[in-house]
Amino acid sequence: MRYTIPDYYFKFKCTADQCEDTCCAGWQIGIDEASEQRYRKEKGLFRRTLRKNINFHDSVFRQQPDGSCAFLREDGLCEMVLQMGEEALCRTCHYYPRHIEEFENEREITLSVSCPEVAKILMSRREPVHFLHKEDEKEETYPDYDPIFFDQLQEAREVMIQILQNRSLPASVRAVLILGLAHDMQLRFDGGSFFTCQQLYSRYQSRKAASYASEWLKSKENKARQTAYQEGHPHTTHQEGYLRHPEKDSAVAIFSYLYNLEHLRADWETVLRETESLLFKEASENDRDSYRRISKEFGAYIMTEYPDWEIQKEQLLVYFISTYFCGAVYDGHIYSKVRMAVLCVWYIEELLKARWLRNEKFLDTEEVCEIVYRFSREIEHSDQNLEAAEKIPIPFP
Protein backbone atom coordinates (compact mmCIF):
# COMPACT_ATOMS: atom_id res chain seq x y z
CA MET A 1 0.00 0.00 0.00
CA ARG A 2 1.26 3.47 -0.90
CA TYR A 3 0.28 6.44 1.24
CA THR A 4 0.49 10.05 0.05
CA ILE A 5 0.21 13.22 2.14
CA PRO A 6 0.96 16.92 1.50
CA ASP A 7 4.18 18.15 3.08
CA TYR A 8 2.29 20.43 5.48
CA TYR A 9 0.30 17.50 6.88
CA PHE A 10 2.07 17.32 10.23
CA LYS A 11 1.75 21.06 10.87
CA PHE A 12 -1.90 20.60 11.73
CA LYS A 13 -2.97 20.47 15.36
CA CYS A 14 -6.59 20.75 16.44
CA THR A 15 -7.25 23.93 18.41
CA ALA A 16 -10.29 22.36 20.11
CA ASP A 17 -12.20 24.92 22.19
CA GLN A 18 -10.02 27.72 20.75
CA CYS A 19 -11.30 27.09 17.21
CA GLU A 20 -13.05 30.07 15.67
CA ASP A 21 -15.71 27.89 14.04
CA THR A 22 -16.10 24.41 15.52
CA CYS A 23 -16.41 21.38 13.25
CA CYS A 24 -19.00 20.02 15.73
CA ALA A 25 -21.76 22.19 14.27
CA GLY A 26 -23.39 22.89 10.96
CA TRP A 27 -23.69 19.33 9.67
CA GLN A 28 -24.91 15.99 10.89
CA ILE A 29 -22.17 13.59 11.93
CA GLY A 30 -22.50 10.01 10.76
CA ILE A 31 -21.33 7.16 13.01
CA ASP A 32 -19.39 4.18 11.68
CA GLU A 33 -20.55 0.67 12.58
CA ALA A 34 -17.71 -0.16 15.00
CA SER A 35 -18.21 3.05 17.00
CA GLU A 36 -21.97 2.56 17.08
CA GLN A 37 -21.54 -0.92 18.53
CA ARG A 38 -19.26 0.45 21.23
CA TYR A 39 -21.78 3.15 22.16
CA ARG A 40 -24.55 0.53 22.35
CA LYS A 41 -22.51 -1.63 24.69
CA GLU A 42 -21.41 1.16 27.04
CA LYS A 43 -22.31 0.14 30.63
CA GLY A 44 -21.02 3.07 32.64
CA LEU A 45 -22.75 6.15 34.02
CA PHE A 46 -22.41 7.85 30.65
CA ARG A 47 -24.71 5.32 28.99
CA ARG A 48 -27.85 7.40 29.60
CA THR A 49 -26.27 10.44 27.88
CA LEU A 50 -25.22 8.30 24.92
CA ARG A 51 -28.75 6.97 24.49
CA LYS A 52 -30.14 10.48 24.69
CA ASN A 53 -27.70 12.07 22.23
CA ILE A 54 -27.42 9.35 19.57
CA ASN A 55 -29.95 8.43 16.92
CA PHE A 56 -29.12 4.74 16.58
CA HIS A 57 -31.76 4.24 13.91
CA ASP A 58 -30.01 6.63 11.50
CA SER A 59 -26.50 6.14 12.93
CA VAL A 60 -25.93 9.85 13.60
CA PHE A 61 -25.36 12.09 16.59
CA ARG A 62 -28.38 14.17 17.48
CA GLN A 63 -28.14 17.94 17.15
CA GLN A 64 -28.97 20.81 19.45
CA PRO A 65 -31.47 23.46 18.25
CA ASP A 66 -28.61 25.61 16.90
CA GLY A 67 -27.36 22.73 14.72
CA SER A 68 -24.39 21.79 16.89
CA CYS A 69 -23.64 18.23 17.97
CA ALA A 70 -25.50 17.14 21.09
CA PHE A 71 -22.15 16.36 22.75
CA LEU A 72 -20.71 19.85 22.18
CA ARG A 73 -20.52 21.83 25.42
CA GLU A 74 -20.84 25.59 25.77
CA ASP A 75 -17.10 25.85 26.38
CA GLY A 76 -16.40 24.27 22.97
CA LEU A 77 -15.23 20.91 24.33
CA CYS A 78 -16.71 17.48 23.59
CA GLU A 79 -18.55 15.82 26.47
CA MET A 80 -17.87 12.37 25.02
CA VAL A 81 -14.11 12.94 24.94
CA LEU A 82 -14.14 14.27 28.49
CA GLN A 83 -16.10 11.26 29.77
CA MET A 84 -14.74 8.41 27.60
CA GLY A 85 -11.44 9.67 26.16
CA GLU A 86 -10.43 10.50 22.57
CA GLU A 87 -10.45 6.80 21.64
CA ALA A 88 -14.25 6.90 21.91
CA LEU A 89 -14.58 9.26 18.95
CA CYS A 90 -16.28 7.85 15.86
CA ARG A 91 -14.30 7.52 12.62
CA THR A 92 -15.58 10.84 11.26
CA CYS A 93 -14.60 12.84 14.33
CA HIS A 94 -11.32 10.98 14.78
CA TYR A 95 -10.09 11.60 11.24
CA TYR A 96 -11.42 15.08 10.49
CA PRO A 97 -10.03 17.25 8.94
CA ARG A 98 -8.17 14.41 7.25
CA HIS A 99 -9.75 13.46 3.94
CA ILE A 100 -8.94 10.08 2.42
CA GLU A 101 -9.26 9.14 -1.24
CA GLU A 102 -9.09 5.36 -1.67
CA PHE A 103 -7.67 3.57 -4.70
CA GLU A 104 -6.33 0.08 -5.25
CA ASN A 105 -3.14 -0.13 -3.15
CA GLU A 106 -3.21 3.67 -2.78
CA ARG A 107 -4.38 5.95 0.01
CA GLU A 108 -4.18 9.68 -0.63
CA ILE A 109 -4.69 11.66 2.57
CA THR A 110 -5.22 15.40 2.51
CA LEU A 111 -6.22 17.97 5.10
CA SER A 112 -9.55 19.56 4.28
CA VAL A 113 -9.56 23.36 4.06
CA SER A 114 -13.05 23.25 5.55
CA CYS A 115 -11.15 23.34 8.86
CA PRO A 116 -10.21 26.93 9.81
CA GLU A 117 -6.81 25.83 11.09
CA VAL A 118 -5.99 23.97 7.86
CA ALA A 119 -7.14 26.97 5.82
CA LYS A 120 -4.74 29.14 7.83
CA ILE A 121 -1.86 26.72 7.27
CA LEU A 122 -2.39 26.52 3.51
CA MET A 123 -3.23 30.19 2.91
CA SER A 124 -0.20 31.32 4.95
CA ARG A 125 2.14 29.06 3.02
CA ARG A 126 4.43 30.70 0.44
CA GLU A 127 6.46 27.82 -0.95
CA PRO A 128 4.92 25.35 -3.47
CA VAL A 129 3.29 22.29 -1.95
CA HIS A 130 5.03 18.95 -2.35
CA PHE A 131 3.77 15.48 -1.55
CA LEU A 132 5.33 12.79 0.64
CA HIS A 133 4.99 9.05 0.10
CA LYS A 134 5.30 5.98 2.28
CA GLU A 135 4.74 2.31 1.46
CA ASP A 136 4.03 -0.85 3.42
CA GLU A 137 3.44 -4.48 2.48
CA LYS A 138 -0.34 -4.36 2.68
CA GLU A 139 -2.12 -5.09 -0.61
CA GLU A 140 -5.73 -5.03 -1.74
CA THR A 141 -7.56 -5.62 -4.99
CA TYR A 142 -10.52 -3.63 -6.29
CA PRO A 143 -12.88 -5.28 -8.78
CA ASP A 144 -13.38 -3.50 -12.12
CA TYR A 145 -10.44 -1.22 -11.41
CA ASP A 146 -8.03 -0.10 -14.13
CA PRO A 147 -4.57 0.37 -12.54
CA ILE A 148 -3.02 1.42 -15.86
CA PHE A 149 -5.58 4.20 -16.25
CA PHE A 150 -4.90 5.29 -12.67
CA ASP A 151 -1.15 5.45 -13.33
CA GLN A 152 -1.83 7.62 -16.37
CA LEU A 153 -4.05 9.92 -14.34
CA GLN A 154 -1.36 10.26 -11.68
CA GLU A 155 1.17 11.22 -14.35
CA ALA A 156 -1.22 13.78 -15.81
CA ARG A 157 -1.88 15.20 -12.35
CA GLU A 158 1.84 15.69 -11.76
CA VAL A 159 2.05 17.65 -15.01
CA MET A 160 -0.93 19.80 -14.01
CA ILE A 161 0.62 20.56 -10.63
CA GLN A 162 3.88 21.51 -12.35
CA ILE A 163 1.94 23.90 -14.58
CA LEU A 164 0.06 25.35 -11.60
CA GLN A 165 3.30 25.91 -9.69
CA ASN A 166 5.00 27.74 -12.56
CA ARG A 167 5.01 31.18 -10.95
CA SER A 168 6.46 32.87 -14.01
CA LEU A 169 2.87 32.85 -15.32
CA PRO A 170 -0.23 34.54 -13.85
CA ALA A 171 -2.48 32.12 -11.96
CA SER A 172 -5.29 32.80 -14.44
CA VAL A 173 -3.10 31.65 -17.34
CA ARG A 174 -2.11 28.51 -15.44
CA ALA A 175 -5.79 27.74 -14.82
CA VAL A 176 -6.58 28.05 -18.54
CA LEU A 177 -3.67 25.75 -19.38
CA ILE A 178 -4.82 22.90 -17.15
CA LEU A 179 -8.38 23.32 -18.44
CA GLY A 180 -7.13 23.03 -21.99
CA LEU A 181 -5.00 20.02 -21.14
CA ALA A 182 -7.89 18.27 -19.38
CA HIS A 183 -10.22 19.05 -22.29
CA ASP A 184 -7.85 17.45 -24.79
CA MET A 185 -7.28 14.49 -22.49
CA GLN A 186 -11.03 13.94 -22.23
CA LEU A 187 -11.34 13.90 -26.02
CA ARG A 188 -8.64 11.25 -26.27
CA PHE A 189 -10.17 9.20 -23.48
CA ASP A 190 -13.60 9.31 -25.10
CA GLY A 191 -12.01 8.38 -28.42
CA GLY A 192 -10.18 5.38 -26.98
CA SER A 193 -6.67 6.84 -27.36
CA PHE A 194 -5.90 7.97 -23.84
CA PHE A 195 -2.50 6.29 -24.05
CA THR A 196 -1.39 9.08 -26.41
CA CYS A 197 -1.91 11.82 -23.78
CA GLN A 198 1.81 12.02 -23.07
CA GLN A 199 2.11 13.91 -26.34
CA LEU A 200 0.08 16.70 -24.73
CA TYR A 201 2.19 17.24 -21.64
CA SER A 202 5.16 19.00 -23.20
CA ARG A 203 2.81 20.95 -25.47
CA TYR A 204 0.91 22.46 -22.54
CA GLN A 205 4.11 23.22 -20.66
CA SER A 206 5.57 25.14 -23.60
CA ARG A 207 5.93 28.88 -23.99
CA LYS A 208 3.68 28.71 -27.03
CA ALA A 209 0.81 27.26 -24.98
CA ALA A 210 1.30 29.88 -22.26
CA SER A 211 1.31 32.63 -24.88
CA TYR A 212 -1.88 31.26 -26.43
CA ALA A 213 -3.63 31.06 -23.05
CA SER A 214 -2.56 34.60 -22.22
CA GLU A 215 -3.82 35.91 -25.57
CA TRP A 216 -7.11 34.06 -25.11
CA LEU A 217 -7.66 35.80 -21.79
CA LYS A 218 -6.79 39.17 -23.32
CA SER A 219 -9.17 38.63 -26.23
CA LYS A 220 -11.93 37.74 -23.77
CA GLU A 221 -11.32 40.98 -21.89
CA ASN A 222 -11.13 43.03 -25.11
CA LYS A 223 -14.38 41.53 -26.35
CA ALA A 224 -16.12 42.45 -23.12
CA ARG A 225 -14.67 45.97 -23.27
CA GLN A 226 -15.78 46.40 -26.89
CA THR A 227 -19.31 45.29 -26.08
CA ALA A 228 -19.47 47.67 -23.12
CA TYR A 229 -18.32 50.49 -25.42
CA GLN A 230 -20.97 49.63 -28.00
CA GLU A 231 -23.68 49.72 -25.34
CA GLY A 232 -22.65 53.25 -24.41
CA HIS A 233 -23.44 54.54 -27.90
CA PRO A 234 -27.12 54.93 -28.84
CA HIS A 235 -26.51 54.17 -32.53
CA THR A 236 -25.10 50.72 -31.75
CA THR A 237 -27.73 47.98 -31.86
CA HIS A 238 -27.96 45.26 -29.24
CA GLN A 239 -27.28 42.62 -31.90
CA GLU A 240 -23.82 44.06 -32.50
CA GLY A 241 -22.82 42.95 -29.00
CA TYR A 242 -22.64 39.25 -28.11
CA LEU A 243 -24.41 39.87 -24.76
CA ARG A 244 -25.92 42.90 -23.09
CA HIS A 245 -23.47 42.67 -20.19
CA PRO A 246 -21.18 39.77 -21.26
CA GLU A 247 -19.02 39.36 -18.20
CA LYS A 248 -21.76 40.19 -15.74
CA ASP A 249 -24.38 37.97 -17.38
CA SER A 250 -21.96 35.04 -17.47
CA ALA A 251 -20.87 35.56 -13.86
CA VAL A 252 -24.46 35.87 -12.62
CA ALA A 253 -25.44 32.68 -14.42
CA ILE A 254 -22.56 30.69 -12.95
CA PHE A 255 -22.93 32.15 -9.47
CA SER A 256 -26.66 31.36 -9.40
CA TYR A 257 -25.88 27.63 -9.46
CA LEU A 258 -24.82 27.91 -5.82
CA TYR A 259 -28.42 28.52 -4.82
CA ASN A 260 -29.42 25.12 -6.23
CA LEU A 261 -26.89 23.19 -4.15
CA GLU A 262 -27.55 21.67 -0.75
CA HIS A 263 -26.95 24.31 1.93
CA LEU A 264 -25.32 22.81 5.00
CA ARG A 265 -25.43 25.92 7.16
CA ALA A 266 -28.50 28.06 7.70
CA ASP A 267 -26.67 31.33 7.08
CA TRP A 268 -24.99 30.26 3.82
CA GLU A 269 -27.76 31.66 1.64
CA THR A 270 -27.36 34.99 3.43
CA VAL A 271 -23.70 35.01 2.35
CA LEU A 272 -24.71 34.26 -1.23
CA ARG A 273 -27.39 36.96 -1.26
CA GLU A 274 -24.97 39.54 0.07
CA THR A 275 -22.38 38.62 -2.57
CA GLU A 276 -24.97 38.80 -5.31
CA SER A 277 -26.17 42.19 -4.11
CA LEU A 278 -22.68 43.67 -3.92
CA LEU A 279 -21.37 42.33 -7.22
CA PHE A 280 -24.30 41.90 -9.53
CA LYS A 281 -26.69 44.71 -8.69
CA GLU A 282 -28.59 46.20 -11.62
CA ALA A 283 -26.45 48.71 -13.47
CA SER A 284 -27.67 52.28 -13.31
CA GLU A 285 -27.49 54.86 -16.09
CA ASN A 286 -24.30 56.20 -14.54
CA ASP A 287 -22.73 52.78 -14.00
CA ARG A 288 -23.68 50.51 -16.88
CA ASP A 289 -20.75 48.18 -16.38
CA SER A 290 -20.50 47.88 -12.61
CA TYR A 291 -19.38 44.24 -12.43
CA ARG A 292 -16.53 44.70 -14.88
CA ARG A 293 -15.45 47.87 -13.10
CA ILE A 294 -15.48 46.12 -9.71
CA SER A 295 -13.52 43.15 -11.08
CA LYS A 296 -10.93 45.41 -12.69
CA GLU A 297 -10.51 47.49 -9.53
CA PHE A 298 -10.28 44.34 -7.40
CA GLY A 299 -7.58 42.98 -9.73
CA ALA A 300 -5.59 46.19 -9.40
CA TYR A 301 -5.94 46.06 -5.61
CA ILE A 302 -4.69 42.47 -5.54
CA MET A 303 -1.64 43.31 -7.64
CA THR A 304 -0.57 46.24 -5.48
CA GLU A 305 -2.00 45.67 -2.01
CA TYR A 306 -2.54 41.93 -1.64
CA PRO A 307 -0.22 40.02 -4.03
CA ASP A 308 -0.45 36.96 -1.74
CA TRP A 309 -3.71 36.06 -3.46
CA GLU A 310 -1.79 34.87 -6.54
CA ILE A 311 0.04 32.31 -4.40
CA GLN A 312 -3.11 31.45 -2.47
CA LYS A 313 -4.96 30.79 -5.74
CA GLU A 314 -2.15 28.44 -6.74
CA GLN A 315 -2.36 26.59 -3.42
CA LEU A 316 -6.12 26.19 -3.76
CA LEU A 317 -5.92 24.96 -7.35
CA VAL A 318 -3.25 22.43 -6.38
CA TYR A 319 -5.39 21.40 -3.40
CA PHE A 320 -8.49 20.69 -5.49
CA ILE A 321 -6.56 18.99 -8.30
CA SER A 322 -4.52 16.81 -5.96
CA THR A 323 -7.61 15.81 -3.99
CA TYR A 324 -10.15 15.04 -6.71
CA PHE A 325 -8.53 14.63 -10.13
CA CYS A 326 -7.55 10.95 -9.87
CA GLY A 327 -11.13 10.10 -8.88
CA ALA A 328 -11.66 10.08 -12.64
CA VAL A 329 -10.43 6.48 -12.54
CA TYR A 330 -13.93 5.55 -11.33
CA ASP A 331 -16.06 7.57 -13.76
CA GLY A 332 -13.83 8.78 -16.58
CA HIS A 333 -14.79 12.43 -15.93
CA ILE A 334 -11.36 13.95 -16.50
CA TYR A 335 -12.32 17.39 -17.73
CA SER A 336 -15.13 17.91 -15.23
CA LYS A 337 -12.75 17.27 -12.30
CA VAL A 338 -10.43 20.04 -13.50
CA ARG A 339 -13.32 22.32 -14.39
CA MET A 340 -14.68 21.91 -10.84
CA ALA A 341 -11.27 22.82 -9.36
CA VAL A 342 -11.06 26.02 -11.39
CA LEU A 343 -14.70 26.82 -10.72
CA CYS A 344 -14.31 26.43 -6.95
CA VAL A 345 -11.43 28.91 -6.92
CA TRP A 346 -13.47 31.29 -9.10
CA TYR A 347 -16.35 31.09 -6.60
CA ILE A 348 -13.98 31.81 -3.73
CA GLU A 349 -12.62 34.83 -5.57
CA GLU A 350 -16.13 36.17 -6.21
CA LEU A 351 -16.94 35.81 -2.51
CA LEU A 352 -13.70 37.63 -1.72
CA LYS A 353 -14.59 40.48 -4.08
CA ALA A 354 -17.84 40.99 -2.20
CA ARG A 355 -16.06 40.83 1.16
CA TRP A 356 -13.50 43.35 -0.13
CA LEU A 357 -16.32 45.71 -1.07
CA ARG A 358 -18.08 45.23 2.26
CA ASN A 359 -14.81 45.99 4.06
CA GLU A 360 -14.46 49.28 2.17
CA LYS A 361 -11.95 47.75 -0.25
CA PHE A 362 -9.68 45.99 2.20
CA LEU A 363 -8.65 42.33 2.35
CA ASP A 364 -6.26 40.27 4.46
CA THR A 365 -5.34 36.63 5.03
CA GLU A 366 -7.85 36.29 7.87
CA GLU A 367 -10.68 37.24 5.50
CA VAL A 368 -9.39 34.84 2.85
CA CYS A 369 -9.18 31.95 5.32
CA GLU A 370 -12.74 32.52 6.47
CA ILE A 371 -14.14 32.53 2.93
CA VAL A 372 -12.09 29.46 2.00
CA TYR A 373 -13.19 27.27 4.89
CA ARG A 374 -16.83 28.38 4.69
CA PHE A 375 -17.02 27.65 0.97
CA SER A 376 -15.25 24.31 1.42
CA ARG A 377 -17.72 23.26 4.13
CA GLU A 378 -20.63 23.84 1.78
CA ILE A 379 -19.14 22.09 -1.24
CA GLU A 380 -16.78 19.39 -0.02
CA HIS A 381 -18.92 17.97 2.78
CA SER A 382 -21.80 17.07 0.51
CA ASP A 383 -21.42 14.31 -2.08
CA GLN A 384 -24.48 15.78 -3.74
CA ASN A 385 -22.76 19.18 -4.07
CA LEU A 386 -19.50 17.73 -5.32
CA GLU A 387 -21.33 15.80 -8.01
CA ALA A 388 -23.36 18.86 -8.99
CA ALA A 389 -20.28 21.11 -9.07
CA GLU A 390 -18.74 18.91 -11.76
CA LYS A 391 -21.71 19.65 -14.01
CA ILE A 392 -21.74 23.43 -13.73
CA PRO A 393 -20.77 24.88 -17.14
CA ILE A 394 -18.12 27.58 -17.33
CA PRO A 395 -17.18 29.84 -20.27
CA PHE A 396 -13.63 28.52 -20.54
CA PRO A 397 -11.97 26.43 -23.28
Image: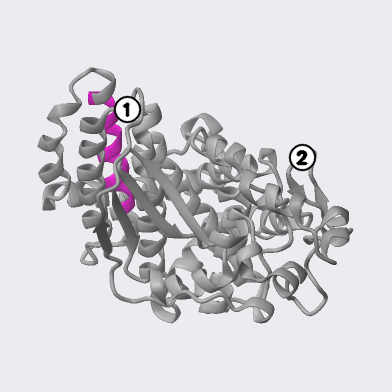
Q: Quadrant of residue 233?
A: top right
Q: Is residue 205 above or below residue 359?
A: above
Query: Percent from the top left, x then y, of residue 147?
Result: 24, 32
Residue 324 x, y percent position in the rendering:
41, 45
Q: As rendered, which of 26 and 86 lies closer to the eye?
A: 86
* Residue at 47% from the left image edge and 74% from the top image edge: 12
Res 114 quadrant in image = bottom right
The crowding category of the residue bearing disc 1, from other C-alpha atoms within 10 Å (few below 14, some 14 to 19, many at least 20), is few
In what quadrant of the picture does the C terminus appear?
Answer: top left
Does residue 114 appear in this view? Answer: no
| Earlier sequence position, callout 2 versus callout 1 | 2
Q: Amino acid at mark 2?
A: Asp
Residue that label 1 marks: 145
Residue designated by label 2: 58
Q: Amino acid at mark 1?
A: Tyr
User: What is the secondary structure assignment of the residue under circle 1?
Assistant: loop
Whether residue 147 is in magenta: the answer is no
Name the residue located 78 percent from the left edge and 68 percent from the top edge: 72
What segment carries the magenta color?
175-188
Kindly report the distance in space between the C-alpha atoms of the residues bearing marks 2 and 1.
31 Å
